[in-house]
Image (cartoon, rainbow, N blue to C red):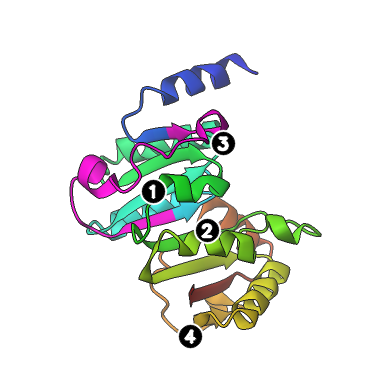
Amino acid sequence: MPKNKLQRFAELKTFSNVYEFLWTERETDFKLKDKWNTEYFKNRNPIVLELGCGKGEYSIGLAEKYPDKNFIGLDIKGARIWRGSKNAQEKKLNNVAFLRTQIEYIEACFAANEVSNIWITFPDPQPNKERKRLTHLIFLNRYKNVLNPDGIVHLKTDSLELYEFTLEVIAENKFSLLDSTNDLYGSPEPREEPKAFKTHYENLFTAQGKKITYLKFRL
């Protein structure tokens, strides 16, 4: 592992807005489960998760736009979370945190009804590996166990295959489809949150002429 990467991993453990819950701890629940509002954010504002957050661009962007909400970015890649944490610190955002973990452990990290919204932004579409897709029913059932009854899942992706797959999952399981478009920026509807800003990769995708799709649904 490159020296600067090792330094970042070491520095990551000192950041007050970053936590880790790794496979070595999987037999227990995470220490902030059911305590994110009271012990970390110290308010009762709604909690929004960004799954596979990478550098946390969407979490940080939404946190700036919605200071009355709390945002937590989840990713297993420490180097990416390091960058997101630094950006949040530089912007002095107190309503953003990061959790380095695998999304499979979401139920060990959050209690029932603790989360209000989940954003899945440009995940790996996992061609030919449906069970690994973050909108497979296996994952959606996990999300359902941490979302409040009115909780919403958002999906932004450049993958038409993943978009259509998710539509099928929603229909087959009789989930409530609230909004859908296979061309987010070609649509006249305002859609304030999904159009709030573009991530680095989203700008690359649109520059290549790819259409961005968007789904909003309730489990």
Camera-nearest label, 1 or 2: 2
Q: Secondary structure at mark 4?
A: loop
Name the residue: 69% across, 62% down.
Answer: 208
Q: Which residue is mark 3?
A: 77
Q: CA distance from mark 1 to mark 2?
A: 17 Å
Q: Secondary structure at mark 3?
A: loop
| Upstream in sequence: badge 4 or badge 2 | 2
Question: Crowding at label 1, few (<14), some or many (≥20) Cα neighbours within 10 Å?
Answer: many
Whether residue 41 is situated above or below residue 174 in the rendered picture? above
Q: Which residue is mark 1?
A: 72
Quarter of image, res 39:
top left
User: Looking at the rendering, in which quadrant would you find the N terminus?
Assistant: top right
Tell me residue 85's x, y (percent): 39, 36
Q: Decide whether residue 46 is among the magenta residues.
A: yes
Residue type beneath disc 2 = Arg
The residue lying furthest to the left in this view is 43
Residue type beneath disc 1 = Ile
Tell me residue 33's x, y (percent): 35, 45
Q: Secondary structure at mark 2?
A: helix
Q: Name the disc covering residue 116, or none.
A: none
Whether residue 43 is situated above or below residue 193 in the rendered picture? above
Q: Which residue is mark 2?
A: 142
| Upstream in sequence: badge 1 or badge 2 | 1
| Upstream in sequence: badge 1 or badge 3 | 1
Q: Which residue is mark 4?
A: 188
Residue 86 seen by the camera: no
| Upstream in sequence: badge 4 or badge 3 | 3
User: Which is nearer the eye, 90 or 126?
Assistant: 126
Name the residue: 23% across, 58% down.
Answer: 45
Q: Identify the magenta region.
A: 20-49
